[in-house]
Every structure is written in structure tokens, then in C-alpha cells.
Image (cartoon, rainbow, N blue to C red):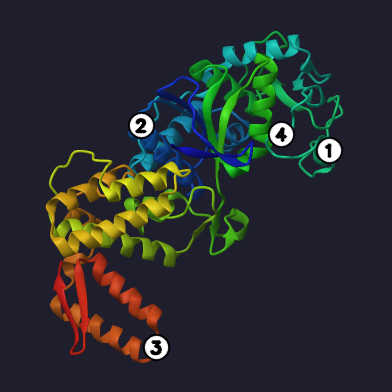
Amino acid sequence: MLKIYDSLTREKRPFIPITPGSARMYVCGMTVYDYCHLGHARVLVVFDIVQRWLRASGLQVCYVRNITDIDDKIIRRARENGESLSALTGRFIRFMDEDAAALGVEKPDHEPRATEYVPQMLELIGRLEQNGLAYPAAGGDVNFAVRKFAGYGKLSGKSLDDLRAGERVEVDEAKHDPLDFVLWKRAREGEPSWPSPWGDGRPGWHIECSAMSSHLLGAHFDIHGGGQDLQFPHHENEIAQSEGANRGPFVNYWMHNGFVRVDDEKMSKSLGNFFTIREILKRYDPEVLRFFILRAHYRSPLNYSDAHLDDSRQALSRLYNALRSVPPEEVRPDWDDPYAERFRQAMDDDFNTPEAAAVLFDLAGVVNRSRSATLAGRLRWLAGLLGLLARDPQDFFQAASPDAGEWSAERIEALIDERSAAKRRKDYGEADRIRAALLAAGVVLEDSARGTSWRRA
């Protein structure tokens, strides 16, 4: 049985759908005012794998991933660019779709935009006001009264006193309490606005997801996901809004993927270690980036470095080499197969993709030794559940190493000499790098007592 780590209860729990045979999942998507970065890539890939596995497990899945197309950053960027909000957001939605497609991410079943759900947001705010949890502030905003919701802090594990003392508390004299957060922002000159019972304005960020998720999935659904950075305050506020308005449970399983680090430091524009998906894909094949992301468990930190991407390219090349050496035949899913059973156990253990990938490497080794087209087909089938190995191997090698066609015998021999020299001076990292580069170009090295020989795979 599939078990999912629930961020709210802080334990792995068997996944029991609200409606037997189905799974309803909402994931917080992108705020579209700039190119998607590596952190976005992780969210896209992680929850793409989750929805793929839920479907492979026989569930009818309804997967919703929203688009935030109205907020302070979007308004500011559009003003700086001298363009309309729709022109700015439309452009970056297109870029986001291109990046997601390159990474092999399947489209969600629904991709709502916040600006299309303002009536649902107003209705939700109205219910919160009726339930005594929202109030119009002196400045024209409508705020949520945090201390009137008894369960506030249960997702983040923070008490109200801890939160009151924290740096994230916004100081605003119009609020009844500094912890209160805005549901509806009064109209400001030059900003887009909508009519409401409290005056013209626009929605706060948190209310958007509560309204879109409940409209498309119901007031109570199975899984809510997103990056760890959204756990507080965004997801904490979603719980307060949704449970406060509906007076019932909101989400059964909360999933959060870990932070992205770059050379063991948090990715940050201020540190100069900030990478967009497009920048990375100029140097690495998209499937290599996808494979790099799933080689780490989704809840663990993901440490980006060129060395790790190079290692992922070498590792993925090993899998593709098995399929190039032994063309796979079409196979039917067979969960009684021992490799498939191991793969299933790994994925049922909170989507343990590193262990599932280890099964693929074991199977690739057997394919290389047995030359079995059936096992090669099984390798491709299992890898396909992770969105891998769908291409012709030669296409992968050409894309992963664009200059592979220029690698003459003389160049290969020269690199082998460089590798031998590196090994003599005990620079094994350089020796491994050369071997990986050759393998990515489709050149296999074979060491023996007589020296190193090579062949094209």
C-alpha cells in the first residue's frame, strides 16, 4: 500500500483516498512574472512523478496546478516594463509551458488562473466574514482574524506566541492583531481591481489557492503539495481560510518538497548562484536535469552543482546504453516480476525515486549480461513510469553530447592518453570525468591488464 509522509502529522501514513479509486491533488504553481528557476523545476518534476505514480497505481487522478497571474510582483514588473499585466503573464506562462514540456512534465488536468476565480474568492471571503473570521480594516482591506481560528499553526508547528515574536509578522495599525493577514486588498491607483461588497480591490495571495482548489476539487480533498518554502505562511493560511469558511477538514495529506541548494548554499539571487531552467538547459539535456532531480528523495535538500549534473548525465547514459545494446521489445506491465515488485515497493514508500532508480540500474546490468530484449522492454516500461528512457538512445546521445559526431578516433585516443596520465598522478576525479564524457558521446572504455581499449556503443 502506498504510504505518504504527511507534513501536518509529521509521519508516513497509508494513502486512503476520500473517494475509493480516485485521488484529488492540488499543487501550488508559479507566479508568472519571470523565467522559471531550478526550484520551480523541482516542483514541476516532483509532482509530475507523484501524479504519474498515482495513475500507475490504478487511481483516477484529478490533478490541479494553479497559476498566480495577479500579485504585487507581477504588477511591479509590468509597470517597470511598461506593458499590460496580460502581456507579461501571457509571455511567461508560455515560457513556463515550454520549460515544463522540455522536462517531460505532463500537463495537469486543470490549470486555473487566479484572475479567472475572483467571484469564488469573494464568496469565500463572505463566508469567513459571516463566520466571524474576517473583518474590514480601517484602510479598506479585509483581513483574516488569526486568533479566532483555533487551529492556526498546526501545519508549521508554531504557536501563536512564537509567530507573534517572529520576524515575518507584518506591522500594520489597521490590523486587529499583527498576525492577521489580508484577504482582499483595497484598490490602489494604477492597479487592476474588481468590484466587491467591501469596495473595489483585488485578492490577497493566500485566498487564491483556497478558492481555486475548493471550486475544482471540493472543500475536502486528498493531497495538497508545494515547495517547503510555502509551508508557512501560505499553506498555514490556506488551512485557516478553507477550514474556517467550510467548518470542516480541508486536506488529508500535505506534501512538501525540500529546498534547492547550489554547491551546498541556498539558491539566491543575492549570492549570485541563481539559475533559471533555460540557463541550465543550455548546458545539459532536459532529461539529464529531470533525472538529477529524481535521484534525490523529494523531501531531502537538492544540491545543484556541475559535478552532480555531469554525474547524472553519465548515469543516465548507462541506462540508455543498455537499450542501445539490446533493442527493447514491447512488454505488458507485470508487477509480479521481481524488479517491478522492488520498483513498486520503492515508489509506494513515499515516492522513493532514488531507490526506484537503483532498481533501474540493477535491471540495466542484467540486460547487458543477458542480452534479453524482454528485460530491456521491462527496463523501458519501469523507467517510463518516472518519465525516463522514452527516446531513441541515439537521439539521447546526440542531444546530451551535441559534438559527439566530431569525436574522431584520434580525439578519442588523445583523451584516453589524458585519462591514463590523470590516473598516474592519482587525479581520479579527472579520470572519471574523461570517462563520463566519452560515455556520453557513445564511446565505451574497457580497461584490462594490457591497457585501455574503446568501442562505440
In this rendered view, identify the residue nearer to me: 332 or 191: 332
Displayed quadrant of residue 146: top right
Which residue is identified by label 2?
Answer: 55
Which residue is identified by label 1?
Answer: 164
The type of residue carrying mark 4 is Lys
> How dense is the environment of label 4, judged by Cα within 10 Å: few (below 14), some, or many (20 and up)?
some
**Mark 4 or 1, nearer chain start:** 4
Under circle 4, the secondary element is loop
Which residue is identified by label 3?
Answer: 426
Under circle 3, the secondary element is loop
In x, y percent, where is residue 31? 54, 35
The type of residue carrying mark 3 is Lys
**Mark 2 or 3, nearer chain start:** 2
- Cα separation between marks 3 and 1: 56 Å
Contact check, label 3 and label 1, Cβ < 8 Å: no
The type of residue carrying mark 2 is Arg
Residue 154 disc label: 4
Q: Residue at x 76, y 22 (%)?
A: 143
Displayed quadrant of residue 131: top right
